[in-house]
Image (cartoon, rainbow, N blue to C red):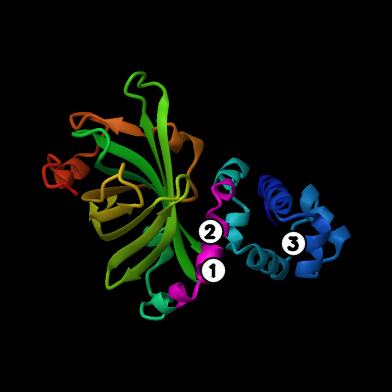
Amino acid sequence: MVPIEDSAALAANLRTLCDRHGSVAAVCRKINVNRQQFNKYLSGTHVPSAANLRIIANYFGLSVPILFSEPDEFRNLVDGNFFHAMATARQLPEFSRFVSNIIVENETQDSEILGVYDRYQYSSIYRGFILRSALCIYRNKEFLQHYYIERFPSFDNPKKTEYIFKYYGFCFPVSDRLFTADFEGIQSNELTFGVYAQVKRNAKRFMFGITSGIAANVFRAPYSTKVALHYRGPGLIKREHLAELTVMDRNDPAIPREALQYLGDGSDMIQM
């Protein structure tokens, strides 16, 4: 039996999805589920069967576990248009040609890489400071996808957030490496690529790699830099993760020693 709190989360998330996809009646017609029965799902009094959960998840382009996410996390993901953007990307012929040349169905265990990470890199805006952002890797049907969020404080008032950037894209595990390609979703002007390798030290889970970004305007120069990912836990990005997003002095003790050792002093960060 599904716990009450999980059925309540599912009901709230289904209401969120229906609000963004038109009427409940239209959704019921599309997935061929009785409206009266679907109303019970929306009220939380009934949980769909395993077969109906798969039908609902497939219609919205999600995995079943994501449907049971905490509602605040779920709205954050949906409002960022991550699902819509990824569904659109999958339909592009260019993307189909791209994935035909790589491994989509892979032997990597989800438990090895799925979840939320603290993401550390030297900031291209605050020179000499380390940017801590939050990254989440999750499975959406046959694809691994990810999103990450950056927050930059104001120069004049460090307690105030000046810039927010959200990136979302796909992950491709190949030959013990994780390749990423993503798009910036707020200003819609940057495309970034990354490659990472897993490292396990003293029960801590890290991935170390490099990322390169190219923006579509002259105000954000192309760059390439080292990135350290420190695993925080399963699920999606939560409010407590967002509250920790900022830029940090490299001597800040909150930065994991392993991440700082990998990043070095930032002198090898490449900017055009």
Q: Nearer the viewer, mark 3 or mark 2?
A: 2
Query: What secondary structure is marked by label 2?
Result: helix
Residue 177 picture location, percent across and down? 27, 66
Q: Residue at x 37, y 70 (%)?
A: 108
**Crowd rating for badge 2 (residues with CA inside 10 Å; few <14, some 14–19, many 20+):** some
Label 1 is placed on what type of residue? Lys
Q: Residue at x 75, y 68 (%)?
A: 31
Magenta-colored stretch includes residue 88: yes
* Residue 195, quarter of picture: bottom left
Q: Nearer the viewer, residue 199 or 194?
A: 194
Label 2 is placed on what type of residue? Ala
Label 3 is placed on what type of residue? Pro
Mark 2, residue position: 85
Q: Is residue 224 left or right of residue 2?
A: left
Query: What secondary structure is marked by label 3?
Result: loop
Q: Residue at x 77, y 68 (%)?
A: 30
What span is in magenta? 77-96
Q: Nearer the viewer, residue 174 or 46?
A: 174
Q: Residue at x 45, y 36 (%)?
A: 242
